Every structure is written in C-alpha cells, then in structure tokens.
Amino acid sequence: MNNIICIYPCDETTVFLDPLQEIIKQNKIPVLNGDTREECHLHDIFQSVSEAECIIFLGHGSSSCLYGSGMTEFLGIDNIHLIKNKKLILLSCHSCEFIENYELNPAIGFNDLPTSMEELRHIQDNDRSYHPELDEKDILYFNQVLINVVGKFVVDVMHNGFVQIEEKMRLYINKEISKILLAPQGLHNREIADLLYELKNEMIFNLS
C-alpha cells in the first residue's frame, strides 16, 4: 500500500511505543511525532493527513476524540472530516468506540489498553474485578506483545493492504497467548493470556 503515514504525538506517557515507531520507520513509513500543541507542526500533520491513503495513530483516545501531546484534543467532531474515508489503524484506548461514533470506514481500533499501572488502576476504579493480580512486570510484558503484534500487523498492511487482516491479526495474538501460557512461571501468565484474549475479542475491524 502506498502513501501511509504514522502520527505519534510527542508525549512522555507513550514513550513505551518508541520501539514500534522504529519498526514503522524501518519500513519506510513516515512518522510525524512532534508536539501537536504547536500550530506549525499541527498544520504540517493535517497537510500530510489530507494527502495520505492510510493513517496509523499511536497515542491516547476516547470515544469522542484522539488526543495529541499533553492530552489536548487532536481529532474530534470539529475536524473529523479530515480522516473520513481514509484507511485507519488507531492504536489508542477506546478507538473502537471512536470509530463507531463517527462511522469511520475502513478502520481498525481497540478497547481498553492497560499499558501502564496508572491506566490499569483507572480501569480498576470502574471495575474492581478487572485483573486485580496484574503488576508492573505483567504490564511491561503486555506492552512488548502489543508492540510485536502491531509491528507485524503494520508491515502486513504495508505490503498487502487490508486483505484478510482481521484473520491475520487474530492469528498473531493467538500465537502470543500460546507463548505466554507455555512460558515458565515468573509472571501472572494466565492473567496476561486473558488480557490478550480480551484484546483480540474487543478489537473492531470496520472494513465493509
């Protein structure tokens, strides 16, 4: 697929995604990762968005918007037209709801992504039964799996477009579930596997 860009707003809370950024760069996909609070940078991003066929977003999100640097609104109701009819891969919390809210198509999104202890605790504040056993080592492992899976996913999209991408993504995650279940103890293996299972089942592939 030609003309793919990645938007990775500069923010200290998402630096764990730097290895994924490097995978994307190694595959000749431009990564726009400046401070979205700067008007000149924001103008350049939106210009690139208007020319892109496929957009990868790495960052924070909600059902109503995608956030830029410092949790400032980046894409929402006032400028959603910029990404209408683009191919979208949105690696952010609640991007599945964002996709459905604005009827974005074709688009791929996620539900909860507990990629830090702070985010895990926030989810648990609303649902005390949400994986209470998980600790920081487990979250670090989950983040590494997320980077590996999405990295493979992005490379596949670059070469083959969105052809059978839902089946491939689920296969990538299933392999990681099998790996953690067979790994020696040292992490909360069963709970991490459950987290990956939820990741797989709660993803949205709005491709039709």
Image: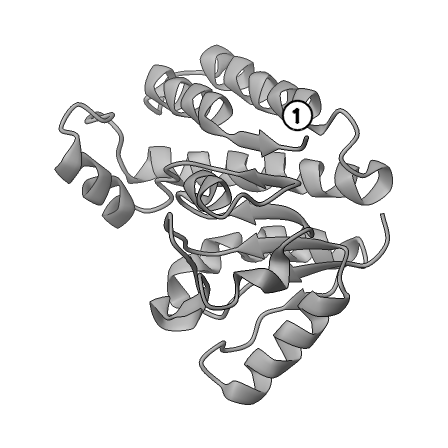
Q: Quadrant of residue 6?
A: bottom right
* Residue 7 seen in the figure: no
57 horizontally vs 6: left or right:
left
Q: Quadrant of the C terminus?
A: top right
Q: Is residue 179 above or below residue 60?
A: above
Q: Nearer the viewer, residue 179 or 55?
A: 55
Q: Which residue is mark 1?
A: 166
Residue 123 x, y percent position in the rendering: 23, 38
Query: Label 1 sits on what residue type?
Result: Glu
Residue 37 x, y percent position in the rendering: 44, 80
* Residue 109 seen in the figure: yes
Q: Which residue appears farthest toward the bottom when viewing the image?
A: 40
Q: Secondary structure at mark 1?
A: helix
Q: Residue at 74% of width from left, 65% of height from top?
A: 30
Residue 146 x, y percent position in the rendering: 52, 37
Q: Nearer the viewer, residue 99 or 124?
A: 99
Q: Is residue 16 above or below residue 50?
A: above
Q: Estimate how packed mark 1 is, as few (under 14), some (14 to 19) or many (20 or more) residues with alpha carbons within 10 Å.
A: some
Residue 79 x, y percent position in the rendering: 52, 67
Q: Residue at 71% of width from left, 68% of height from top?
A: 50
Q: How many marks?
A: 1
